[in-house]
Image (tube, grey):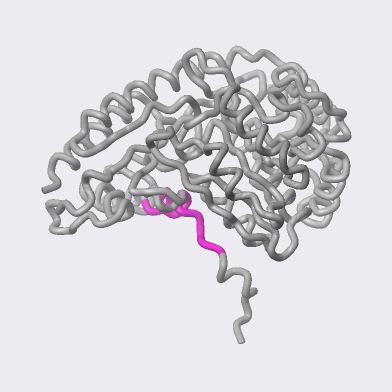
Amino acid sequence: MSFLAKSLARVKPSATIAVTQKARDLKAQGRDVISLSVGEPDFDTPDNIKKAAIDAINRGETKYTPVAGIVPLREAIATKFKRENNLDYKASQVIVGTGGKQVLFNAFAATLNPGDEVIITAPYWVSYPEMVLMSGGEPVIVMTSIEKQFKLQPEDLERAITPKTKWVMLNSPSNPSGAAYTRAEMKALTDVLMRHPDVWVLTDDIYEHLVYGDFKFVTPVEVEPNLWNRTLTMNGVSKSYAMTGWRIGYAAGPDVLIKAMDMIQGQQTSGACSIAQWASVEALNGPQDFIGQSRKVFEGRRDLVVSMLNQASGLKCPTPEGAFYVYPSIAELIGKKAPSGKVIMTDEDFVTELLESEGVAAVHGSAFGLGPNFRISYATSNDLLEKACAKIQGFCASLR
């Protein structure tokens, strides 16, 4: 009899973490590697936020916090939701976790029974289906297409809903595709959900502030307020304020769900890091100019990467509306042979050969549930992006 839980057999390791670690290993061996696999802003956390953390330490804010988060942070989050999204929440309807991942996991753990279904759009963030499986639920994957800009279509959502559907998972802008829903596109989805009163909505808005051009971000309850009593709106400070290592995610929703998540977290990790929470108060309440500055930089990087990849032989790279990822198709390269003699049969073959021959680390699209594609994060400098994209162009040209 195996010592380990049988449920582990249903779960796969994170592909993004695996690729990032492989890139680190090659660097340690002396290889020149450009890693475009990790979703992490390369900017430093703004000074006012770091100062708030130092001030909190000097004030002695180093004790255990309430499980759901310190009151000033929960109030700041409620204020942010009203200010930026026109959503009304009380501080008691907000929960703070150790990163957005914990918030999502706790929501599933608090609600899923064996056989409950969660609708997830592919391509998806690698952790969504695995968290559902670990919580005893069943992920129901709805495919999208490059022709539809990797966006869930209302008719496909309608078909996917069954009497077992507990949640619909929405992520806009998306990791990995960068696709984001306009108000009209979101309204078409919420219209479907309004016809199914027992289905809840879990929306991952972590890339909310990283949208480009004239695009306007919307969240489901903002578009359809009647979904308020069955929606969990998740967000965090990691991407918007370059605070990935601070590990603060948060969500707001109906009292019954927040209380259940609070109970789970109380038996799991208790409150998030006190210093990181006080820093997050400053992030949300303090000057917001950092967001606009970083957004402008990311938009320039997006345009650079999309242009260079679309010049590569056999690649087709849509222009995403947000986040800091592109998700090009390699469909035209399947079946071609690399200089090593390896035939590219899958997108995993492609990224493996790319890393081995050119020292560029990307993540294969099949890890996100939709291929043949690969994901590049452009959260790094223009110089490295130009160098990496030139290497990708050379690699694609070498395939025969």
Q: Picture coordinates of residue 202 (x, y %)?
A: 68, 41
- In the orientation shown, which residue stands out farthest toward the bottom? 1
Number of callouts: 0
**Residue 9 shown left or right of residue 369 in the figure:** right
Q: In this view, does 25 lie above or below 215?
A: below
Residue 283 lies in quadrant: top right
Nearer to me, 66 or 374 = 374
Residue 235 lies in quadrant: top right
Q: In this view, does 295 lie above or below 365?
A: above
**Residue 92 shown left or right of residue 276 in the figure:** right
Say if the magenta span includes residue 113: no
**Residue 254 shown left or right of residue 138 in the figure:** right
Residue located at (61% from left, 20% from top): 47
Q: Picture coordinates of residue 231 (x, y %)?
A: 75, 38
Residue located at (60% from left, 12% from top): 289
Please say whether residue 53 is visible from this viewpoint: no
Q: Picture coordinates of residue 92 (x, y %)?
A: 88, 34
Nearer to me, 121 or 65 = 121
Q: Quadrant of the N terminus?
A: bottom right
Magenta highlight range: 11-22
Say if the magenta span includes residue 14: yes
Residue 78 lies in quadrant: top right
Residue located at (74% from left, 16% from top): 83
Please say whether residue 37 is visible from this viewpoint: yes
Q: Picture coordinates of residue 327 (x, y %)?
A: 38, 38
Nearer to me, 259 or 317 = 317
**Magenta region, mostly helix, strand or loop?**
helix
Residue located at (63% from left, 37% from top): 204
